[in-house]
Amino acid sequence: MGDFVNVYIGAPDGQTAVSLSSADKINVSIAAGFTGSGTGNAAQILATYTAGEALSGQRLVKIVSGEAFYYSPESSGELAGITKTAANQGEPVEIVLGGEVNSQGWGLTADTRYYANTNGAITANPATPTGRLQFVGVATSSEKLIFNPDDAIELN
């Protein structure tokens, strides 16, 4: 069967390819509308973008013109992912597009739903009466979040 299983979605000039290697690695390549590079494993899908501002690790981001910026539910832009690492402006930053996010000492509460807060932070207690309510995932332990966001709910 070979080392890879490929799935293509779309026309030949705008394909999305998902490959599974013999080592159970998922490789994602998206030609149209995706300006980062992507790799991952069975528990996580990653992409690399350029930081549009200084970014901390484990923060929600949106992508604007190919660069990553903090996501806030009260501002414009769609949630793209959560930073795996910190980066200075202009440097590459790894972003988790889906799956498990780990951070020692994060302080999450297991079996709790988390939502987007201002400046890329996450919270268990969303408090904004305006903007959007953006679910981002569920904690499985104090150091792990399964990042699996739903569509945002407009509150205006």
Image (cartoon, rainbow, N blue to C red):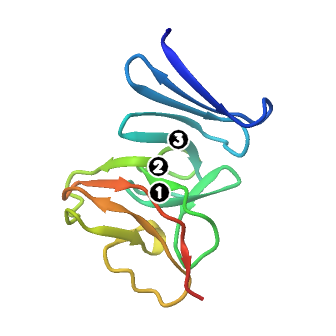
The residue drawn where x is 60% and y is 76% is 75
- Tag 2: amino acid: Ala
Depth-wise, is mark 3 or mark 1 nearer the camera? 3
- Tag 3: amino acid: Ala
Q: Measured along the vertical axis of the image, is residue 14 above or below residue 76?
A: above
The span from disc 2 to disc 3 (Cα, nearest Å) is 14 Å
Q: Measured along the vertical axis of the image, is residue 127 above or below residue 22?
A: below
Q: Measured along the vertical axis of the image, is residue 66 above or below residue 123?
A: above
The residue drawn where x is 58% and y is 24% is 6
Mark 2 nearby-residue class (10 Å; few <14, some 14–19, many ≥20): some
Residue 55, numbered circle: 1
Depth-wise, is mark 2 or mark 3 nearer the camera? 3
Where does label 3 land, which residue?
47
Find numbered disc 3 in the image and state the secondary structure of the residue it sits on: strand
Which residue is more in the foreground, 73 or 138?
A: 138
Residue 87, numbered circle: 2
Question: Residue 32: x and y, percent?
Answer: 73, 41
Quarter occupied by residue 147: bottom left
Look at the image and tell me in which quarter the C terminus lies.
bottom right
Q: Is residue 35 visible?
A: yes
Decide: marks 2, 1 in contact (CB < 8 A)? yes
57 vs 112, left or right, is right
Find numbered disc 1 in the image and state the secondary structure of the residue it sits on: loop
- Tag 1: amino acid: Leu
